[in-house]
Amino acid sequence: MTKQYLALWTVSGKGLALCQRIKNLLSVDPWIPRHTLPRYAIDIYAPERLCQNTARPFGSLSESLAATFSDYCGHIFVGACGIAVRILAPLLIHKQVDPAFVVLDNQGAFVISLLSGHLGGANALTRHLASLLNATPVITTASDLLSPPVPSIDILARNAGLTVLDWDLLPFFQNCLLEGKNLGLYDPCRCLQQPIPRGLLPRYSCPDEKTSQLPVITVHWRHIEKQPSRLRLVISHLVLGVGCRKDTEPNLLRKAFDSLCKEYMIARDAFRALATVEEKKNEPCILRLAEILHLPLLTFSSQNLALTTTPHPSKKAGERFSTPPFSVSEAAALLGAGSFHDDPVLILSKITYFKKLTLAVGGSNAFMQSEPNEIHPFT
């Protein structure tokens, strides 16, 4: 579900006036959230006793915020930090999904980044509001307080389109950066391009962090085993093409997917979509796997699939859909990859499982050019 833009909250008359002022300023100079939105509508929420036509009334602040917390990219609360902390506590899920939350005093003298400073964008929102209001920004994340600032690993990963697997290890690795300790980086596809302050992480090469005796950040789409001194970032560029018989048992497709990932050493989080022919869009086994993996399902017409050149076209598929021979899984994987990349390539040709399923994998050719087993400097 696409999130809405911003919600402004207040519990006082002065706060309502400031909310209206902020809304007017942001309508001219908007804050750009982490999600690209079709519109930049701002909603103001205020107690029923204060409500005017420009605000949405609430009876209970905590209940109203809880009901709308995940609907917005960011929340701005005009009031005491203590109130905000108490009502936020039961709503927090994870820094990956929690929206930005910023607090201001009634006079608009201070703008405080309270929640999701990096990934949610609260730090950026805080700076933007402070600039608009000529206020003092209050940002307490350690990486932003150094001079020059040290990039946040989760932001580097997000900007590079990478998925963080080991969130439990992220604080340790971020602290290494903050303290100027050496780290190794395994990134053969060169996904992390943003420079780190020179000298912070000197050049170091080694095929494995056990030999290097350094904590290592790994960046790849292949499966890499978890270890205490290894922070894994995954390149999510793959599309799973699926062909199946009608009413194939959902557990068979799940087993086939797990088998494929294990045999070919592919990280489960490297997939960004499933793809198949339109006639299979309601097939229970495919819908179930998409739900389990939290991935979108792309569908293509049999005519377009039949026009796609693949290694193993099927005569039976052509007869079934009254087209020239084609491979549902291979063509769907290629067209699905083309939905995300300018250089789609078939990474794995179709593999048959249980005599009922065929799976194929498409992705970006940019990540297939080099697979050296070296760790290069995080620079």
Image (spheres, rainbow, N blue to C red):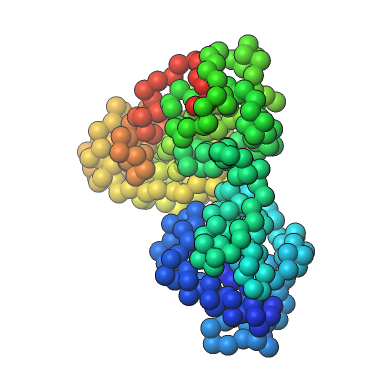
> Residue 178, percent across and down?
64, 34
Residue 49: % across, % down: 68, 88
124, above or below 58, in the image: above
* 305 horizontally vs 134: left or right: left
Residue 139 place in picture, x, y as percent: 64, 52
Tell me residue 240's x, y (percent).
44, 37
51 versus 351 height, above or below: below
* Numbered circles on residues, count: 0
Q: Residue at x 55, y 33 (%)?
A: 233
Is residue 15 in sight in this rendering? yes
Q: Residue at x 56, y 62 (%)?
A: 130
Location of residue 237 by image quarter: top left
Q: Residue furthest top?
A: 211
In-front residue for pair 127/75 = 127
**Residue 245 is at least partly visible in this image:** no
Q: Which of the pair 228/182 is nearer the observer?
A: 182
Q: Quadrant of residue 53?
A: bottom right
Residue 271 vs residue 232, the one in the foreground: 232
Q: Is residue 306 left or right of residue 168?
A: left
Front residue of 365/113: it is 113
> In percent of the image, x 30 and y 38: which residue is there?
342
- Please report the residue visible at 54 percent of the width from the left and 42 percent of the height from the top: 155
122 lies left or right of 264 = right
